[in-house]
Image (cartoon, helix red, strand yellow):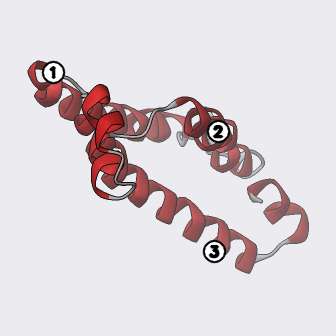
Amino acid sequence: MFFLVQKLNSIELLLAGRLIVGLSGGFATCLVPMYMTEIAPLRLRGAVGVICQLGISCGVFLGQIAGLNTVLGTENSWHYMLGAFVPLCIYALVITSIILPESPKYLYIIREQKQKALDGL
């Protein structure tokens, strides 16, 4: 989407892309730590919550570096910088949603599979 913005000269496409990125960032900020702390062993729950926020902070830092005028923040390459996260999003949505197990809380409350939830714990 971001790769087409410069060719189509469309501010609407840029705004739609930014909306999608903002929503996915918000979901990631809320859902990833919650899921990770649910599946983590009790002794590691605090560390897992911190690691998630550290990963988000490091991503913001790397994004700031990529936005420098000497890296990808130029008039000709800004759309590459905005679209660079697409492979990561595809990986996160497609690959990890298939691999990651359902949380015991979800199994117990939503699906009412009590034995599978206890086995997962």
Residue at the far bottom: name it.
12
Q: Is 26 drawn above or below residue 78 in the view shown?
A: below
Q: Nearer the viewer, mark 3 or mark 1?
A: 1
Q: Is residue 65 above or below residue 105?
A: above
Name the spot of residue 1 as percent of width and height, x first. Answer: 77, 60
- Identified at 72% across, 77% down, the residue is 11
The amino acid sitting under disc 3 is Leu
> Residue 39 appears in which quarter of the rendering?
top left
Q: Report crowding for label 1: few under 14, some 14 to 19, many 20 or more residues within 10 A (C-alpha).
A: few
Q: Residue furthest right?
A: 7
**What amino acid type should be assigned to the residue bearing mark 1?**
Leu
Say which mark, if any, is on residue 72. 2
Percent from the top left, x then y, of residue 9? 84, 72
Left or right: 12 as drawn, with respect to 71: right
Write down the quadrant of residue 77 in the picture: top right
Local secondary structure at mark 3:
helix
Q: With 46 as the anchor, is 20 left or right in this view?
A: right
Residue on which disc 3 sits: 15
As helix, strand or loop, the secondary structure at mark 1 comes to: helix
Residue behind mark 1: 44
| Helix, strand or loop status at disc 2 | loop
